[in-house]
Image (cartoon, rainbow, N blue to C red):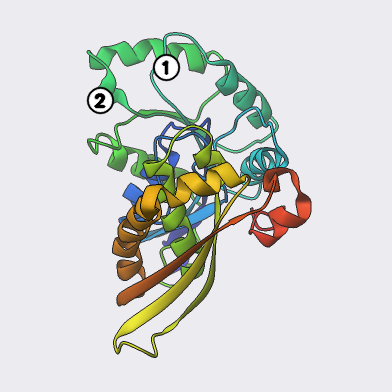
Amino acid sequence: MQIDTYKSGFVAVIGRPNVGKSTLINKLVGKKVAIISNKPQTTRNRILGIVTTEQYQIAFTDTPGIHKAQTELGRRMVSASYEATHGVDCILFMTTPVKQVLKGDEIILSNLKKNRLPVFLVINKVDQLKRFNDIDLTIALYKDLYPFAGVYPISVLEDKNVNHLLEGIQTVLPFGPKYYPDTMASDHSVSFLIGESIREKILNLTKEEIPHSIACVVEEIKDSLEVAGYKDVYATIYVERDSQKKIIIGKNGDMIKAIKEKSIVDIRKLLNSKVHLDLWVKVKKDWKDRPNDLKSLGYSEDSL
């Protein structure tokens, strides 16, 4: 590898909740490094997704969706998203096709004006348009708000124009060395990825206040002493109220059983092993507003 011909750099992906940031990064990396659901604020931590080829290495940072924070956790998530735009080489501002500028997007773009970095307008979910040309309205609206370095209407779901976006990113990357090993796809530990996988299953299986009130911590991963070839995984699901604990466990334990069964599918792939998963449910009252609890659950300001 010659540094004078090889390109490498860092790209932050920012936007409001549910525009497809995590789905895009998973697509670019070619494997699942960030959980996805149709619930707002699914992503809580900054997650690095690394793409390495013979020509370039790009480290994409998936960020929590920027929203009006109602809790200390929410405030930290929003702060982490803006901090992720510092020290990068390019920013992808993601939105979806709209007929008028959304207030949340306007606030994000106003904050991005403090940067002097190339910012690309990435409009995801164009597959939802009746006519592709309808995207022209969204482009016109947003180009009036910000001097974008490029505009990319895409559909991650249908893999439309994603490669075109990748080519555009390469044009603004500096020449430089690889920062990560070729086989590295994310900077997070296996324990973190397992915890996120369990949380994803809860997000997809529950509704109302539950998705925003749960956290998951993997306590231990070890070789099973009872069954050869198995890994024992011990994890704790935290909720804010006793009523939420009852919902997570479910009638006759049906919900916790479903969470466990669906989680094991992903955990097997992560550990490349057969798995026994032991889940506990505990109550930490109002943990989203308690700094000490946030730290113990992996949401300290340094770790987000």
Examine the rendering and report whether any part of residue 54 can be seen: no
Residue shown at 56% from the left, 51% from the top? 46
Q: Residues within 10 Å of mark 1 (few under 14, many from 20)?
A: some
**In this view, the mark in front (1 or 2):** 2
Rendered location of residue 6, percent (x, y): 42, 62
State the mark number for residue 71.
none
226 horizontally vs 13: left or right: left
- What mark, if any, has residue 139 been given in the picture? 1
Which amino acid, by three-letter code, is at mark 2?
A: Asp
Cα–Cα gap, marks 1 and 2: 16 Å
Q: Is residue 297 above or below residue 152?
A: below
Asked if residue 33 shows in the view, the reply is yes
Determine which quarter of the picture holds residue 66. Answer: top right
Query: How far across and how far down the image is residue 278, in percent?
Result: 43, 69
Instruction: From the image, tell me which residue sits under label 2.
Output: 127
Farthest front residue in view:
252
Q: Secondary structure at mark 1?
A: helix
Element type at marker 2?
helix
Against 204, is 265 above or below?
A: below
Badge 2, how many Cα within 10 Å: few under 14, some, many 20+? Answer: some
Task: Point out residue 134 in the picture as x, y percentages from the top left corner.
Answer: 30, 11
Q: Quadrant of residue 21?
A: top left
Say whether residue 290 is left or right of residue 41: right
Q: Nearer the viewer, residue 46 or 61?
A: 46
Closer to the chain start, of discs 1 and 2, is 2
Q: Please name whichever residue, 110 or 210, is drawn nearer the observer in this view of the structure.
A: 210
